[in-house]
Amino acid sequence: MDLKFIRENPELAKEIVRRRREKVEIDKILALYEERRRLVQERDEKRRELKIISEEIGQRISRGEDVSEKRREAREISDLIKELEEKLATKEKTIGELIALCPNLILPGVGDEEKIVKEWGKKPEFDFEPLPHYEIGEALKILDLKRSAKIAGSRFILFKGKGAILERALINFCLDYHIERHNYTEISPPYLNKEECFFAAGDLPKLADEMYKIENDQFYLIPTAEVPLINLHREEILREEELPKYYCAYTACFRREAGSYGREVRGITRVHQFDKVELVKFTKPEDSEAELEKMVKDAEDILQELGLPYRIKLLPAWDMAFQSAKTYDIEVWASGMRDWLEVSSLSNCTDFQAKRNKTRLRRRDGRLEYVHILNGSGLAFPRLFIALIENYQTRDGKIIIPSPLQPYTRFKVIE
């Protein structure tokens, strides 16, 4: 939602802001734009006056006439032009700050209530009371949350022994699956990124309080590999025949979870640092909706391979990320917690991020336009870890490793 869109569709812009429950004032942006337009006209008129006076001064000098009064008049106009330009710069800065708070548009089909669009698999049935992951993890010595708290405080994870191996196995399994079966190119990016990368992704300025900033340098710790991946082609022009581009990356992710204290305290469902495999696509605009559906299927394939029951939700407009125009969440069933846990959020961000990072597409006929960028988790840990150990627990306290993971763990059971 840029200035051009707001000027041409003010009522639609207000409706989008209302549906997305954002607080940006569209009328204020329009009023500032009109003030800016008036200042531009006034400045340009004064520039014309100054040009006429300058020419007159030159003519008078050539005739040997006194020009002191005209020079005084020229200085006054120059000072006024400078003052107008300073006011313009202030207006443009304010408009830019407000535009940066405007969310993406909403694609057709996205409603105002969440909708379950698919369910797969059958919840496991037990002839005993299934335990939550934190109890199983402590009993089997694969999680040590007391020592993680001693090292880093609350909401951090310490995987141990076969738990650490299982976490690493899940990461490698997901990476290999997407690379070998879904044709993604693996990237191993930096975990510290520049501020402009976060602005391009849509995390800044809106989510500054949710991220960890490096105080003495202009870096933030990434909340997801989406940030470096969407910046791979910042300020580049991609040829039509190059698209689509598929990228995947494993990274640790860092989030302050500033507004979530007091919720979901037990276990490892909401933590400050966690592992995730991220998927990002650069596509032609006309292909992005179909590519989102394919990306959802890519994430589903992992869960089906591991035999974990899941459901897919189409998020309502108000619950989508700021930069997204359409989002699906995939939730996996965790038997010990008796709850659905989000393991993937997959979004079509259309040209929102591309406009911010200036990634464009050159058509075969030479036309330039912005690419569409999509992102999704493929998948997120540790919630996948939780679902796996809770759903595959046995009466005698063991965890059975699904057969597709066994080549990665090199063991069949945790006991």
Image: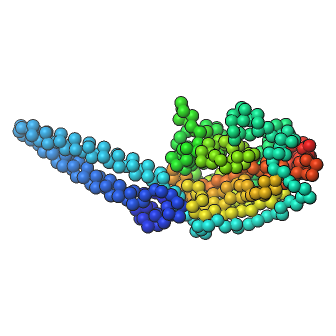
Q: Which residue is found at the position 45% from the left and 61% from the top? A: 5
Q: Which residue is found at the position 17% from the left and 42% from the top? A: 76
Q: Position of residue 33 (x, y in %)?
A: 35, 56
Q: Position of residue 31 (x, y in %)?
A: 35, 58
Residue 324 figure quarter? bottom right
- Asked if residue 38 shows in the view, the reply is yes
Residue 61 figure quarter? top left
The correct choice, above or below, for 242 with respect to 290 in the image is above
Q: Which residue is found at the position 74% from the left and 66% from the top? A: 118
Count every numbered label the image shows and give the total.
0
Q: Position of residue 74 (x, y in %)?
A: 16, 42
Which residue in the rendered view is the most extreme toward the top?
216
- Asked if residue 378 shows in the view, the reply is no
Q: Quadrant of the C terminus?
A: top right
Q: Position of residue 135 (x, y in %)?
A: 82, 45
Left or right of 59 on screen, residue 168:
right
Q: Which residue is found at the position 84% from the left and 51% from the top? A: 131
Left or right of 36 on screen, residue 362:
right
